[in-house]
Image: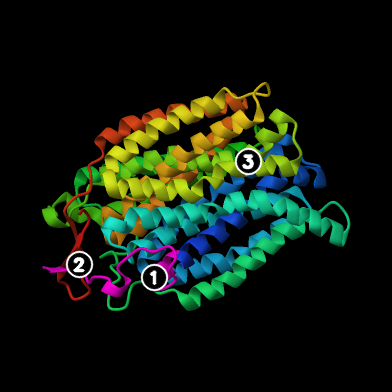
Amino acid sequence: MSSATPVPPSKNKLNIFSFAGKNKILHLGWMAFFLTFFVWFNHAPFLSAIGETLDLTKQQVKTLLILNVALTIPARVIIGMLTDRFGPRLVYTCILAIGSIPCFTFAFAQDYETLALSRFLMGFIGAGFVVGIRLISDWFPSNELGTAEGIYGGWGNFGSAAAAMLLPTMAIGFAAWFGGAEGWRYACATSGAVMALYSIIFYIKVRDTPKGSTYFKPKKNGAMTVTSKGDFWLMMVFKIPMYLALAILAWKLSPTGVSLLSQSTVNIIYVLLGILYVYEFISSYRHNKEVFHTEVPEAQRYDFKQVGVLNILYFATFGSELAVVSMLPLFYQETFDLSIVAAGLLASSYAFMNLMSRPGGGWLSDRFGRKTTLLILTAGLAAGYFLMGIVDSGWPIAMALLITMFCSFFVQAGEGAVFAVIPLIKRSMTGQFAGMAGAYGNTGSVVYLTVLSMVSYQTFFFVIAITAIVGFIALFFLKEPSGVIVEEMPDGTFAEIKVSH
């Protein structure tokens, strides 16, 4: 058994001020993620303007928020598998280029159906995050991995805040230039054009691994591989919430919700989701049937429970972030009677914290332990959302802003800490693990936004706080990554990758 090929010594130090070697890959990676989030959330600061332009009801506007994150649930799982198989360079390039198409159709939609379909398809863009997680894990060693993944996630995630800050001003400029009150259309379209152009730069400049290093792929393509009978059943249980989230979305589009789909169509969707789950169960069993009669060698095993716990935590952290980023401009606008520009700027403070919080969560994990860091951050997350729940119009705006930033720190640092663990479970399956955890984040956002459509803002925040407490309890089942993980080389030999220091 050999050790995995090390990164060349000249490139062996993380330096955010460098644009060479692995540091160049880190910067190109977070820029790609930044643009996907900038485009994915380019609608958030314009919800009121879009509603006025197309004469939408409040329920229709809120449905757009759910549609925006729905497709990302299956997309992240699929993109994770594709990334492990074909490499981050090609997969990220395709997401950046193809994702611009529904952005343009959304920007110039003339009816609610086109608007809704475009927003649904734009959920595909949100799967880009998964690709970068695998890319960074192949370029950085374990003692820098949490920090590097945190920088990638945090600086990239800032795209949603940048959209809230910049796009309203751009829209005003476009409205003055072209005339009329539809500057939001040109602002959204411009963001899509920039993302498409960056896809070319990314493809030219990025490599999947350092020169001379091995890109580890799953031994078998298709369904996720598990290494014990118990893990198979646990994996199938954890698949269920993703299907339920899609069923919730269908329900929201039924006559009971916004009547975008007929009840018979929705019933067909329910049946198809059930059939898809049965199909996935059968294909996963066929993919993993060896574990039911042949024991996997200890050195080659991984514990799916680790993935399950991190799924729950990402449901509460990233799921709540997606939901809150989508609704926060409207929350500030309605609670404090602010203009769309002022509300957008205040709401951007939530995602603004990503610049330091998510890298901070990764750095704390690298220095003080993955599990301890997650326990502390998850407790802070619950407290932060409880405080958000008691904010109302009687509060000073400055105090509401401070609480928003306090809550945001724990949310995003928690996200950074989650992805400080995921690449240390099994390198060849990092894309799939990141895809499933990411899909759980989107599942959380669908659940939270559905709750928001039925309750007050205050109750919405309290519900998130309760799920954070569930995540805190689940953390006691997480094992701290230690020792090495074993991966099979293309020639059939095995390599050891160090996951603790």
Say left or right for 420 vs 63: left
Label 3 vs label 1: CA separation?
38 Å
Residue type at mark 1 is Phe
At x 17% / y 49%, what residue is drawn?
A: 292
Q: Nearer the viewer, residue 267 or 388?
A: 388
Callout 2: few (<14), some (14-19), or many (20+) C-alpha neighbours within 10 Å?
Answer: some
Whether 477 is drawn above or below 431: the answer is above
Whether 475 is drawn above or below 436: the answer is above
How is the rendered protein coloured? rainbow
In the image, which is nearer the foreground, mark 3 or mark 2? 3
User: In the rendered image, which quarter is residue 316 located in?
Assistant: top left
Which residue lies under the disc numbered 1? 86
In the rendered image, residue 8 lying in the magenta stretch gets the answer: yes
Q: Earlier in the sequence, mark 3 or mark 1?
A: 1
In the image, which is nearer the foreground, mark 3 or mark 1? 3
Say left or right for 440 vs 450: left
Label 3 vs label 2: CA separation?
47 Å
- Where are the magenta residues, as a range? 1-26
**Judging from the image, what secondary structure is the residue with disc 3 in?**
helix
Say left or right for 28 vs 267: left
- On the image, the x and y values in percent for residue 409 come to 47, 40
Q: Earlier in the sequence, mark 3 or mark 2?
A: 3
Q: Which mark is residue 488?
A: 2
Q: Which mark is residue 347?
A: 3
Residue type at mark 3 is Ala
At x 25% / y 65%, what residue is drawn?
A: 219
Label 1 vs label 2: CA separation?
17 Å
User: In the rendered image, which quarter is residue 392 located in?
Assistant: top right
At x 38% / y 53%, what residue is drawn?
A: 434
